[in-house]
Amino acid sequence: YSWKMTDWAKLFETVEKLALFFAAPIWIIFVTIAWYYYITAAWDEEKIKKAKNIIINILIATVILLMAHTFLKDLITL
């Protein structure tokens, strides 16, 4: 590879910013969907379960994204 370390750092920084740029609106959309299912459930256990599963998946995705963010920040500072 003929890339210098600063080139890799710029690439990692760009990937990180792009992931965070797309993650925030997607997170808001899924929270809104889960909120809609929960509010309109009217004691329907199936809709409540679906809303809870969406919220759990949102939390898991957020943790994965934050871990990737931390990992890329560490790579940038090398």
Image (spheres, grey):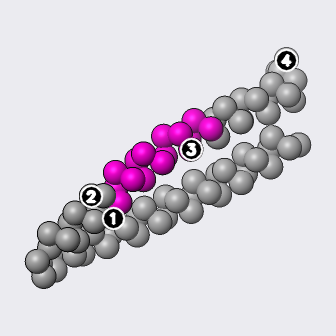
Instruction: Select label 3 or label 1 by which is in front.
Output: 3
Disc 1 element: helix
Residue 4: percent from left, percent from top: 87, 24
Give coordinates of residue 30: x percent, y percent. Answer: 34, 55
Cβ atoms at labels 4 and 2 below 8 Å apart: no
Query: Can you tell which quarter of the image residue 6 is in?
Result: top right
Q: Earlier in the sequence, mark 2 or mark 3?
A: 3
Read off the magenta span: 17-31
Secondary structure of the residue carrying numbered label 4: loop
Mark 2: which secondary structure? helix
- Disc marking residue 20: 3
Q: Which residue is mark 1?
A: 54
Q: Image check: 38 left or right of 9?
A: left
Q: Could you tell me if residue 50 is visible in this image? A: no
Q: Is residue 13 above or below residue 31?
A: above
Location of residue 64 in the rendering, given as x and y in whole percent from the top left corner: 57, 58
Q: Nearer the viewer, mark 1 or mark 4?
A: 1
